[in-house]
Amino acid sequence: MDLDDLPTPALILDRARLARNTQAMTERVKALGVGLRPHMKTAKSADVAGLAVDGNFGGITVSTLNEAEYFLGHGITDITNAVCIVPAKLDQAAALIDRGADLKLITDNAGVAKAIAAHPGPRDGAFKVLAEIDCGEHRTGVVPESADLLDIAGTLAAAAKAEFAGVLTHAGHSYACRTEDDMAAVAEEERAGAVRAAERIAGAGIPCPTVSTGSTPCVMFARDVTGVTEVRPGVYMFGDLFQAGLGTRAIDEIAISVLATVMAHGRDRNQVYIDAGGLALSKDRATAALDDDCGYGLVCDAQTAEPIPGLRVASVHQEHGQVTGDGPLPFDDLPVGSKVRVLPNHVCMTAAAYDAYNVIDSDEGGGGTEVIATWGRCNGW
C-alpha cells in the first residue's frame, strides 16, 4: 500500500528517521556514561521500544500501569512507572509483579509510603519504590531537603514487602528554556537536586541505588551527570516542532506526521481546509511560545514530508484544519482530494489520537512512500 491509498487522517511513522534518532540518543547516553531507560509514554509501542533500547529489550519507563501491562505482554520486564502511585492501584501493580514484571513505582507522599508498606504485596518479592524529587518543575515530588523524603525512604526500607529503590526526578521546566546554556543550567539543577536527595538518604543509613533523571532537553545539553545512574528521555524518538524549536531535533529528523486530505478551498479568504482537525492533530500550541510559531502543525508535501514554504495549520475545529500561508496559497498544487502531511506541534498528544502507526522508510527506494508495516500501540489507562 502507498501513502496515497491510506484513508485519512492517518498517523505516519518514518522508520529511518526513528532509527537515526534512537541511535543518536544511544550514543549520547553512552558518552555520558549512564544508563538509558527510554520513556515510552509517547510511542506506547513495543516495536518502537525495540529500537529505543538499541535493538535489545531492556529497561524502559512508562506513565501508566496499562502501558506496563502492554509492554510486559511483549516481553519487556524491567519497567519504571514514573507517575506517583496511589493506594488503589497497588493490587494491579502487585499482579504485574506476580506475572514477572520487575516493576518500579514512585511516590512523593509519606502516607502513600505507609500504605505501600502495609500492603500484602506481590506473592514473591516486594514492591520496589523510588521517591520522586522536585528539582524545580513544581509538579510532583518532594524537595531534596524535605523531612518527608527521609520518612518515605525509612518507611519503605523497613517494610517487609517493599524496598526503597532510589530517587527519581524530572526537570520539565527545561521546556521553558530557549538556549543551550539555559537548558544546561536546568540539567545541572536536576542533577544536583537528585544527587543531594540521594546523599541525604544514604547519610541516614539507607541504600539509594538508583538516581534517575532526564528530559530530552536535559539529556541532550547536560554537561555533568556525576552521581546519576540513569536517564529517561522519550520524545527524542519521534521529535516534533517544539523540540525542533528547542534544538533537540531538526525539522528533517521529525519521524511522525499526519497524512490528511484537502477537502475544501476558501480562495476568497486564502485558506485551504484539510480533514485533520483538533482530534487528529491535538490542540496543543506549544510553539506559540517560540519565535517561530508553527500553529497546529507545518503543512508538508505528502510524498517527501518537506515543508511547503509558509504553510501551516492556523486553526482547528474538531475535524477541520484551516491552512493559511505567508502569501497566496498554491491552490492549483493542492486540489480538493489531494493529500498533504502535517508535522505535529506536540507529538505526544498527536500520537495519542491513533491506535497504530503506518510505517514507511524514507531510506528505501521509491521515495519511501510505501507503507511497509503497521505497528500497534496501547492507549488508555
Image (cartoon, rainbow, N blue to C red):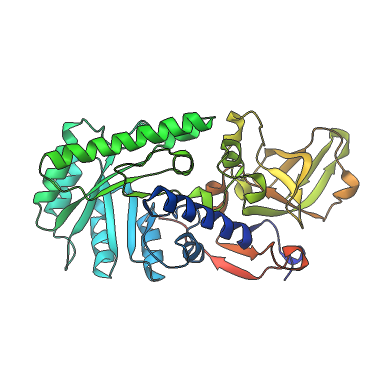
Residue 246 visible, this angle: yes
Left or right position of 203 against 256: left
Q: Residue at x 31, y 45 (%)?
A: 228
Q: Residue at x 47, y 55 (%)?
A: 26
- Residue 19, by quadrant, is bottom right
Q: Residue at x 82, y 55 (%)?
A: 338
Say which quadrant the C terminus sits in: bottom left
Above or below — where is 62 with respect to 124?
Answer: above
- Residue 270, by quadrant, is top right
Closer to the camera in the image, 317 or 326:
326
Say which quadrant the N terminus sits in: bottom right
Left or right position of 228 against 328: left
Q: Residue at x 33, y 66 (%)?
A: 77
Closer to the camera in the image, 14 or 2:
14
Left or right position of 85 against 174: left
Closer to the camera in the image, 266 or 114:
114
Where does the image place residue 319, in percent across and percent down from the top left? 67, 48
Where does the image place residue 252, in percent across and percent down from the top left? 67, 49
Where does the image place residue 127, in percent across and percent down from the top left? 20, 57
Where does the image place residue 182, in percent across and percent down from the top left? 48, 29
